[in-house]
Amino acid sequence: MEHYPFQSVAAERITQVNETEQASNNFRVEAVTESGEARVLLVRKHILLSKEDDVSFLEKTLAYLREKNISVPQLVATRTGAQHCTFAGCWWQASIFIEGNHFSGTPEELMAAAKGFADLHHAFTG
Protein backbone atom coordinates (compact mmCIF):
# COMPACT_ATOMS: atom_id res chain seq x y z
CA MET A 1 0.00 0.00 0.00
CA GLU A 2 3.08 2.24 -0.01
CA HIS A 3 2.08 3.47 -3.49
CA TYR A 4 -1.28 4.76 -2.21
CA PRO A 5 -2.09 7.82 -0.04
CA PHE A 6 -2.83 5.99 3.20
CA GLN A 7 -1.22 6.62 6.56
CA SER A 8 -2.13 3.21 7.91
CA VAL A 9 -3.54 -0.11 6.85
CA ALA A 10 -5.05 -2.45 9.41
CA ALA A 11 -3.10 -5.56 8.39
CA GLU A 12 -5.28 -7.77 10.54
CA ARG A 13 -8.23 -6.62 8.44
CA ILE A 14 -6.95 -7.71 5.02
CA THR A 15 -9.00 -10.62 3.70
CA GLN A 16 -9.12 -12.33 0.34
CA VAL A 17 -12.49 -11.93 -1.31
CA ASN A 18 -14.37 -15.26 -1.31
CA GLU A 19 -14.79 -15.83 -5.01
CA THR A 20 -11.45 -16.48 -6.68
CA GLU A 21 -10.91 -15.49 -10.27
CA GLN A 22 -8.51 -16.85 -12.83
CA ALA A 23 -7.49 -13.34 -13.88
CA SER A 24 -6.80 -11.73 -10.50
CA ASN A 25 -6.53 -12.03 -6.74
CA ASN A 26 -8.80 -9.65 -4.87
CA PHE A 27 -8.34 -8.46 -1.30
CA ARG A 28 -10.62 -6.46 1.00
CA VAL A 29 -8.42 -3.93 2.83
CA GLU A 30 -9.36 -1.54 5.61
CA ALA A 31 -7.20 1.59 5.51
CA VAL A 32 -7.02 5.15 6.81
CA THR A 33 -6.22 8.00 4.42
CA GLU A 34 -3.58 10.61 5.18
CA SER A 35 -6.43 12.96 6.15
CA GLY A 36 -7.73 10.41 8.70
CA GLU A 37 -10.69 9.09 6.69
CA ALA A 38 -11.44 5.36 7.06
CA ARG A 39 -11.81 3.54 3.75
CA VAL A 40 -12.52 -0.02 2.70
CA LEU A 41 -10.77 -0.92 -0.54
CA LEU A 42 -10.72 -3.74 -3.03
CA VAL A 43 -7.06 -4.28 -3.89
CA ARG A 44 -6.62 -6.32 -7.06
CA LYS A 45 -3.49 -8.17 -8.07
CA HIS A 46 -3.68 -8.81 -11.82
CA ILE A 47 -2.54 -12.26 -12.85
CA LEU A 48 -3.34 -12.33 -16.58
CA LEU A 49 -2.64 -8.65 -17.29
CA SER A 50 1.14 -8.65 -17.47
CA LYS A 51 1.69 -5.54 -19.61
CA GLU A 52 1.10 -1.98 -18.49
CA ASP A 53 -0.72 -1.26 -21.78
CA ASP A 54 -3.29 -3.94 -20.86
CA VAL A 55 -3.90 -2.39 -17.44
CA SER A 56 -4.20 1.07 -19.05
CA PHE A 57 -6.72 -0.31 -21.56
CA LEU A 58 -8.79 -1.66 -18.67
CA GLU A 59 -8.73 1.80 -17.05
CA LYS A 60 -9.80 3.47 -20.31
CA THR A 61 -12.62 0.95 -20.66
CA LEU A 62 -13.85 1.68 -17.12
CA ALA A 63 -13.71 5.44 -17.82
CA TYR A 64 -15.66 5.00 -21.06
CA LEU A 65 -18.34 2.90 -19.35
CA ARG A 66 -18.61 5.44 -16.50
CA GLU A 67 -19.20 8.18 -19.12
CA LYS A 68 -22.06 6.03 -20.47
CA ASN A 69 -23.59 5.83 -16.96
CA ILE A 70 -22.64 2.19 -16.42
CA SER A 71 -21.83 1.34 -12.80
CA VAL A 72 -18.14 0.36 -12.66
CA PRO A 73 -15.53 0.25 -9.90
CA GLN A 74 -14.15 3.62 -8.76
CA LEU A 75 -10.36 3.34 -8.91
CA VAL A 76 -8.20 4.97 -6.23
CA ALA A 77 -5.23 6.95 -7.54
CA THR A 78 -1.71 6.28 -6.31
CA ARG A 79 0.41 8.98 -4.67
CA THR A 80 1.66 9.92 -8.16
CA GLY A 81 -1.86 10.11 -9.61
CA ALA A 82 -1.66 6.84 -11.56
CA GLN A 83 -4.51 4.33 -11.40
CA HIS A 84 -2.21 1.32 -11.04
CA CYS A 85 1.21 0.35 -9.72
CA THR A 86 3.62 -2.54 -9.98
CA PHE A 87 4.89 -4.60 -7.08
CA ALA A 88 6.68 -7.95 -7.00
CA GLY A 89 6.33 -8.33 -10.76
CA CYS A 90 2.54 -7.84 -10.89
CA TRP A 91 0.24 -4.94 -11.65
CA TRP A 92 -2.05 -3.80 -8.83
CA GLN A 93 -5.09 -1.54 -8.64
CA ALA A 94 -7.19 -0.34 -5.73
CA SER A 95 -10.84 0.66 -5.91
CA ILE A 96 -13.56 1.56 -3.44
CA PHE A 97 -14.90 -1.73 -2.01
CA ILE A 98 -18.56 -2.48 -2.70
CA GLU A 99 -20.16 -4.99 -0.33
CA GLY A 100 -22.03 -7.77 -2.05
CA ASN A 101 -22.69 -11.45 -2.25
CA HIS A 102 -21.64 -13.94 -4.87
CA PHE A 103 -24.16 -13.87 -7.71
CA SER A 104 -26.36 -16.95 -7.49
CA GLY A 105 -28.98 -16.06 -10.07
CA THR A 106 -32.54 -15.78 -8.80
CA PRO A 107 -35.02 -14.94 -11.58
CA GLU A 108 -35.05 -11.27 -10.48
CA GLU A 109 -31.24 -11.14 -10.40
CA LEU A 110 -31.02 -12.74 -13.85
CA MET A 111 -33.43 -10.12 -15.21
CA ALA A 112 -31.32 -7.34 -13.65
CA ALA A 113 -28.14 -8.91 -15.07
CA ALA A 114 -29.72 -9.12 -18.54
CA LYS A 115 -30.57 -5.43 -18.33
CA GLY A 116 -26.99 -4.70 -17.26
CA PHE A 117 -25.62 -6.65 -20.23
CA ALA A 118 -28.02 -4.81 -22.54
CA ASP A 119 -26.77 -1.49 -21.13
CA LEU A 120 -23.18 -2.60 -21.73
CA HIS A 121 -24.01 -3.64 -25.30
CA HIS A 122 -25.67 -0.29 -25.92
CA ALA A 123 -22.69 1.59 -24.42
CA PHE A 124 -20.28 -0.19 -26.74
CA THR A 125 -22.42 -0.08 -29.90
CA GLY A 126 -24.78 2.83 -29.50
Image: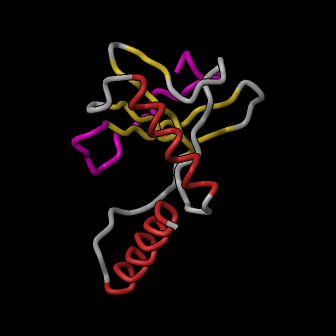
Q: Quadrant of residue 25?
A: top left
Is 1 left, or right, of 18 in this rendering?
Answer: right
Residue 28 at x, y percent in the picture? 44, 41
Of 126 and 119, the residue lying toward us: 126
Q: Position of residue 35 (x, y in %)?
A: 78, 28
Taking the spot 28% from the left edge, 71% from the top edge, the residue there is 104
For the view shown, which residue lies furthest in the front direction? 126
Residues drawn in magenta: 1-24
Residue that protrudes farthest toward the left in the picture:
22
Query: Count the marks: how many?
Result: 0
Could you tell me which residue is drawn at 51 percent across and 38 percent down? 59
Q: Is residue 102 shown in magenta? A: no
User: Is-magenta flag for residue 14?
Assistant: yes
24 relative to 77 in the view: left or right: left
Q: Is residue 123 above or below residue 34?
A: below
- Camera-side residue of 40 and 96: 96
| Image x and y of residue 91, in percent | 39, 24
* Closer to the camera in the image, 42 or 72: 72
Vertical relation: 79 (above or below) 96: above
Where residue 20 appears, as percent x and y from the top left, is: 25, 46
Left or right: 3 as drawn, with respect to 22: right
- Color theme of the render: secondary structure
| Up-down relation of residue 76 to residue 89 (above or below) | below
Looking at the image, the residue that sits furthest to the bottom is 107
